[in-house]
Amino acid sequence: MHEQAVRPPAPIARGEKAERGPARFIAEPAALGLAGFALSTMVLSFINAGILSEAMLPVVLGLALAYGGLVQLLAGMWAFVKNDTFAAVALSSYGGFWISFWALNQFFLKEIPVADQEGALALYLLCWGAFTFYMWIVSMKVSLAVNSVFLTLWVAYVLLGLGKAFGSDLLFHLGGIFGIATAACAWYTSFALVANTTTKRDWIPIGETRSAQQDAP
């Protein structure tokens, strides 16, 4: 009697739910995380670009803590359940960024001597730029829409960081403009994910470059 070979299950197409395990109860967390990231980034970037006054910064802090921070962090945790490593790392990390941004402005920046604050902020922004750069490289295997988010974001971080490091308003404002572009790309990607998964047809293109939403079936 011959033993029948056990075939591995077929990969799960993006937008389809897993057939087993807790992931089958989880919707697309990236759509939510990108929405929280986009809105918080858009509001802050209008200030960073010099379009709005820095006196309006407190309006960003609530968004940074609640929507860009906690909501995006939760989306990252749900991405872990879906076994989507890229989304889990990205959403959780930028949720942490927004929470740290809120805490820095509310509590910790004032603990740094005024003469050292610009340098400290430059270090903070450039290190986030380094993280975003390698996530941009990996995002080439996710989708063109996600790749555009990370491309504009790492440039924004670098320009903002250099603006702080060299005391250049021009570089900092350019960073804000790239931040606006990042938010627009993130909103588009979130909209596409919501629209495509809700209607169950891919009518909003995102330029998918991977065949499965999960890392393993």
Image (cartoon, rainbow, N blue to C red):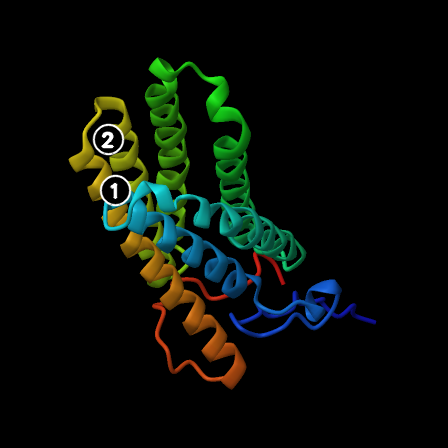
Q: Position of residue 153 (x, y in %)?
A: 33, 46
Q: Position of residue 29 (x, y in %)?
A: 57, 62
Tell me if residue 54 can be seen.
Answer: yes
Badge 2, how many Cα within 10 Å: few under 14, some, many 20+?
Answer: many
Examine the rendered structure and indicate whether residue 50 appears above or below residue 78: above
Mark number displayed over residue 144 = none
**Left or right relative to 204: residue 28:** right
The residue pinned by badge 2 equals 163
**Left or right relative to 8: residue 51:** left
Residue under the point 43% across and 58% down: 39
Examine the rendered structure and indicate whether residue 3 appears above or below residue 215: below
Q: Position of residue 96 (x, y in %)?
A: 55, 41
Q: Type of residue at label 1?
A: Gly
Residue under the point 50% across and 47% down: 64
Quadrant in which the N terminus appears: bottom right
Badge 1, how many Cα within 10 Å: few under 14, some, many 20+?
Answer: many
- Determine whether the residue tagged by mark 1 lies in a helix, strand or loop: helix
Q: CA distance from mark 2 to mark 1?
A: 8 Å
The residue pinned by badge 1 equals 175
Examine the rendered structure and indicate whether residue 133 appears above or below residue 114: below
Q: Are marks 2 and 1 in contact (CB under 8 Å)?
A: yes
Tell me if residue 151 can be seen.
Answer: no
**Left or right relative to 40: residue 48:** left
Front one among 184 and 57: 57
Q: Position of residue 124 (x, y in %)?
A: 41, 28
Quadrant in which the C terminus appears: bottom right
Examine the rendered structure and indicate whether residue 18 appears above or below residue 164: below
Q: Type of residue at label 2?
A: Gly
